[in-house]
């Protein structure tokens, strides 16, 4: 047995997967070149800024594999995350509902929730993309950061449509890449290499290994893999800084951040190489995106938000516009750039159409498959909506080229023409009252009251 097989066997043994999973990749004779339901891989980076990739203009950080992914697929310049912070973004991605409707609307509940942090879990009635695809015959797996259900709650991945789960349930625990434990399905898995202050088991690498093994084990049937990496979210930790150790004038955090992004990029390359080895690349659609805007703009070093205003936590473009790449050889036109405006609520209906699955009736997203396939699709006339329960209720809307932002309950809307002002520097609300009136009319329908994030009544504090 080769050294690689021995390493893989030891890894799989730790997860109770058995020796059968050690088999090396082979031909996928069951499908050949015939049409069938495509495999779906959704790779989600954490706090990766709009301009942190070479294909989006990054000059300092090396991302050759993700850049190649874009060259072989479609790169979007107007794709948006579901929210401006972690948990609600993932709730939108999983449920196809925007933050005015989805269950989880912030990282911490204001009323109710689970534990001291008042984390709000998904409930049994919430339908996730994993449940939709599982009903269509897909094997479903997730590894990385979940953030939508605490231990023993209704929101854990195995109770929300995922066959396999390995990672962090709580996003606060995910701040460390060397935690004392992770969750394997519904059991706590102690990481012996991280006990007593040791730092021997880097979780990002463990997530990558499990993702690669999941693909190997399910190569002969349709699968959905949600790979929710934590990189490059702080803490800034990595076993070794190799590519940027000698950069003069860079801080330790800058070197580590850059190395984390490049490390993630190399693992995207490993995934794409495996798809090629298994001969399933042409029947696998791969999405790559970030869960919100950059946590640190790194102005003057990486310029992670590029020309966009704001960062993570803001409803301006820098907080919600995200890099998005989709690759599907022979289906998605290679080397194309699309300015179509879409967001995470659209992923569930798109995945359902790819799988020939039935849709839940209460989603806000629409399928963007025609756009992905290079066909004409009018996505600009609809409203894209975000809200965040801060200062009462912050809201944002994109409609056509217009972007409206309300920073607190009761305040007037700001308005920006993104076609002329993507940096949102010039508030033109006074010059376009008809646009403001149209958006205000939509806003009266966008928000459904949440028991966990009640909107403050008039006369009460809106903070």
Image: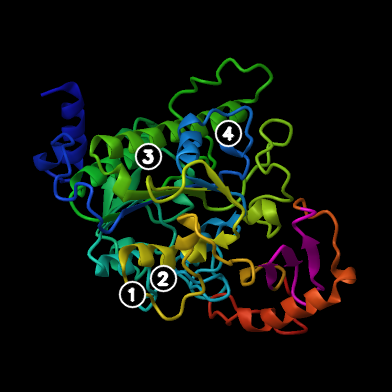
In the image, which residues are magenta?
Answer: 393-421
State the separation of the CA atoms marked 3 and 2. 25 Å
Eyeballing the image, is 455 above or below 276? below
Find out whether the residues at labels 3 and 2 contact each other: C-beta distance under 8 Å.
Answer: no
Nearer-N-terminus badge (4/1): 4
Quarter the C terminus occupies: bottom right
Above or below 102: residue 108: above
Report the residue marked by disc 1: 358
Q: Is residue 225 magenta?
A: no
- Percent coordinates x, y for residue 333 in the rendering: 46, 47
Q: Please, what secondary structure does the residue beneath circle 2 have?
A: loop
| Lateral position of residue 350 relative to residue 183, left or right | right
Numbered badge on residue 122? 2
Give the Cα distance between marks 4 and 2.
Answer: 36 Å
Q: Is residue 456 visible?
A: no
Image point 16% across, 27% down: which residue?
6
The residue sitting at 39% across, 77% down in the picture is 360
Residue 203 - label: 3
């Amino acid at each position: 047995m080769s050294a690689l097989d021995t390493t893989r066997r030891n890894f799989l043994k730790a997860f109770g997967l058995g020796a059968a999973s050690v088999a090396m990749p082979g031909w996928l004779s069951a499908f050949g070149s015939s049409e069938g339901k495509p495999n779906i891989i959704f790779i989600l980076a954490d706090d990766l800024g709009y301009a942190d990739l070479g294909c989006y203009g990054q000059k300092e950080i090396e991302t050759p594999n993700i850049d190649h992914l874009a060259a072989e697929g479609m790169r979007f310049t107007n794709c948006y995350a579901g929210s401006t912070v972690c948990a609600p973004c993932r709730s939108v991605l999983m449920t196809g509902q925007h933050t005015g409707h989805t269950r989880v609307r912030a990282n911490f509940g204001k009323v109710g929730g689970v534990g001291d942090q008042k984390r709000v879990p998904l409930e049994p009635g919430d339908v996730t993309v994993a449940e939709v695809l599982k009903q269509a015959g897909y094997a479903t797996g997730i590894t990385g950061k979940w953030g939508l259900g605490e231990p023993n709650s209704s929101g854990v991945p195995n109770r929300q449509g995922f066959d396999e789960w390995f990672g962090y349930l709580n996003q606060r625990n995910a701040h460390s890449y060397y935690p004392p434990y992770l969750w394997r399905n519904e059991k706590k898995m102690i990481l012996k290499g991280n006990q007593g202050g040791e730092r021997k088991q880097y979780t990002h690498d463990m997530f990558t290994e499990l993702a690669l093994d999941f693909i190997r084990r399910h190569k002969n049937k349709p699968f959905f893999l949600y790979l929710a990496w934590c990189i490059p979210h702080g803490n800034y930790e990595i076993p070794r800084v190799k590519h940027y150790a000698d950069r003069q004038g860079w801080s330790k955090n800058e070197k580590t951040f850059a190395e984390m992004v490049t490390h993630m990029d190399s693992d995207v390359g490993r995934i794409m190489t495996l798809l090629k080895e298994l001969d399933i690349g042409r029947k696998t659609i791969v999405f790559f995106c970030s869960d919100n805007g950059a946590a640190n703009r790194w102005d003057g070093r990486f310029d992670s938000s590029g020309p966009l205003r704001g960062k993570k936590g803001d409803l301006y473009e820098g907080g919600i516009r995200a890099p998005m790449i989709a690759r599907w050889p022979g289906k998605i036109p290679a080397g194309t750039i699309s300015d179509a405006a879409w967001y995470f609520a659209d992923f569930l209906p798109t995945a359902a159409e790819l799988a020939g699955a039935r849709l839940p009736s209460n989603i806000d997203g629409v399928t963007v498959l025609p756009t992905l396939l290079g066909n004409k699709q009018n996505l600009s006339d609809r409203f894209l909506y975000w809200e965040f329960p801060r200062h009462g209720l912050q809201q944002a809307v994109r409609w056509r080229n217009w972007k409206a932002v309300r920073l607190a309950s009761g305040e007037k809307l700001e308005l920006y023409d993104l076609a002329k002002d993507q940096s949102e520097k010039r508030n033109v609300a006074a010059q376009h009252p008809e646009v403001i009136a149209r958006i205000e009319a939509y806003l009266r329908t966008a928000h459904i009251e949440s028991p966990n994030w009640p909107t403050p009544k008039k006369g009460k504090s809106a903070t």
